[in-house]
Amino acid sequence: MSNQEGKNIDYYVGIVGSILTITYYVLSTHSFLKIKSESPNNLEQVKFYKILFNYTASFFGYFFADLNFYEEMSRCNLFAILFNLSFLIVYVFFQIRIDLVDAILNILMIAIASLTYFHYFYEILVDEFIFGLYYMGANSLVLMHFIYEIFTEYKLKSKSRFTFYSNICFTLAAVCWFIYGIWKKDYYCKIIFGLEILFGSWFIFGHKMFSYLYKGTSEEFKDITSEDFNNNQNSNMNNTIEFEESKTKKYENI
């Protein structure tokens, strides 16, 4: 196989992976559609931490790809940084109207962490091994939140078509980047995206399996909308994993 053919395979796999990754990030922001200027109390249903983890993964991913001259991955993560950061800014903008202190803390957290890591990666860090650990760690945050969402749906015996299709997009993107990692002989990509493929495939199969097992019983999975699922999830927060302290009391009088 010629070098030109190798570059073509590398390029096209990276492009498809970039499209699927960006699509997953776009789908991750669907909860922001609930924010309305006349009804800011819906802010508690926005998945802030999911976007924050996506931003962290794309932020670290950009520097990792830039260090290794992975052009397709670098462009994908640069776009993802700007995309996810824009939604974090939207969230903080509406949060200022509800809780100024929390909004300021979120601004400081995002700004200080971003500037600190930017300086660290560009001016200090030159070790590819440490770069790889940061990259896998950041993507692990996305994976853990992904598992948390699916686990919560299974625990509530509820399924969402939106989450299912998002899962497919997440898994297919992982497949592309896994192949990309094989071609680049990068074991960091192979490890983290191999795990994403494993869990993503397991949950896709589990979605169908549990739907079949509970079909026709009193515990049959309900096909619900994303909004219904979030309302159901909020009502069961005391029995699920929590990433953020409930702010119901803070918003209920708005």
Image: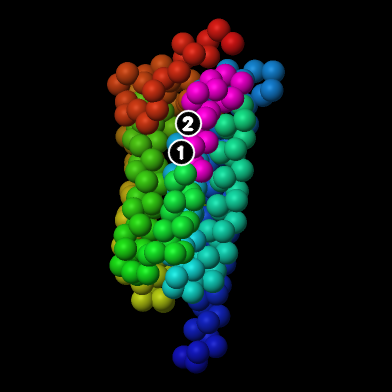
In magenta stretch: residue 104: yes
What residue is rendered at 55% in x and 74% in y?
11
Q: Is residue 203 left or right of residue 230?
A: left
Q: Check whether the beta carbons of the residues at disc 1 and disc 2 lie within 8 A of each other.
A: yes
Q: Residues within 10 Å of mark 2 (few under 14, many from 20)?
A: few
Q: Which residues are magenta?
A: 95-111
Q: Is residue 136 above or below residue 250?
A: below
Expressed as whole percent of the image width and height from the top left, the position of residue 170 reads 46, 51
| Residue with the mark numbered 2 | 105
Identify residue type, mark 2: Leu
Expressed as whole percent of the image width and height from the top left, the position of residue 119 reads 46, 58
Residue toward you, 39 or 148:
39
What residue is rendered at 59% in x and 25% in y?
96
Q: Residues within 10 Å of mark 1 (few under 14, many from 20)?
A: few
| Residue with the mark numbered 1 | 109
- Residue 189 visible somewhere in the drawing: no
Q: Main secondary structure of the magenta part?
A: helix
